[in-house]
Image (tube, rainbow, N blue to C red):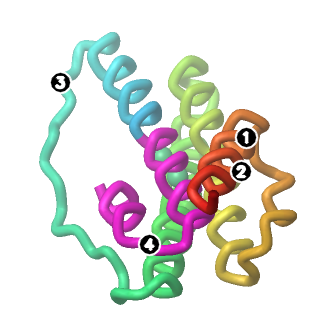
Amino acid sequence: MVYVRNAFLMKDCVPSRLTEAIAIDEMRHMNWLGDLIVKKGGVPVMEHKELDFGSEDLKGYLQKQYDLENDAVKRYQEQVDLIGESDAETVGTLKHILDEEKRHRKEFRLQLETKTIDKFDQLPFHSYFCIFYACSVSKS
Ligand SMILES: [Fe+2]
Ligand SMILES: [Fe+2]
C-alpha cells in the first residue's frame, strides 16, 4: 500500500517505476503466504496497521521504503531461524521472499545514494526492461 501510493507521487520516473515494480513483488509475497496459510489450515487476516508513507518528498519516500525492507529482512530471517528444520516448505517460501526483500532493500539504498540508471544492474531483467522502457517512453 505504501509503495503503490508513493509511486503515484514520485515525480522522477525511475524511482517511481522501481517502487511500482517492487509493489508488485510484495503482492506476490502476500499471495504466496496466503496460499501457505490456507494450505496449512489457517485463515489469512487482512488487518492492517496504520500506514506511514515517510516524509513527503522523494528522499523521504525512499528512506521509509528502505527502512520497511530492512525491517522485513530482519523479520523473515528471524522466522526462518525460528522454524528451522521443522517445516521445509514454509522455510523455503520464507527464504525466497527473504532474498527478494534483500534485493528490494538494495535497490532503494542505491536510489538513495544516486539516481543514475546504471545502478540498476542488480534488477531482474524484466524489471530493468520495464523501468528503462517506461522511463524512455515518458521522456519522448
Ligand atoms: Fe515482501
Ligand atoms: Fe520488499
Whether tag 4 and tag 2 are in contact, CB under 8 A, the answer is no
Quadrant housing the C terminus: bottom right
Q: Looking at the picture, does residue 64 appear above or below residue 94?
A: below
Q: Residue at x 73, y 83 (%)?
A: 113
Q: Which mark is residue 129?
A: 1
Query: Residue 47 placed where, x, y %?
Result: 13, 48
Say whether disc 1 or disc 3 marks the residue closer to the N-terminus.
3
CA gap between label 4 and label 1 equals 19 Å
Chain part drawn in magenta: 1-26
Q: Is residue 69 left or right of residue 110?
A: left
Which three-letter amino acid code belongs to the residue tagged 1?
Phe
Residue named by callout 2: 132
Which three-letter amino acid code belongs to the residue tagged 2?
Phe
Quadrant housing the N terminus: bottom left
14, 112: nearer the viewer: 14
Q: Looking at the picture, does residue 118 appear above or below residue 126?
A: below
In the rendered structure, does residue 46 fall within the stretch colored magenta?
no
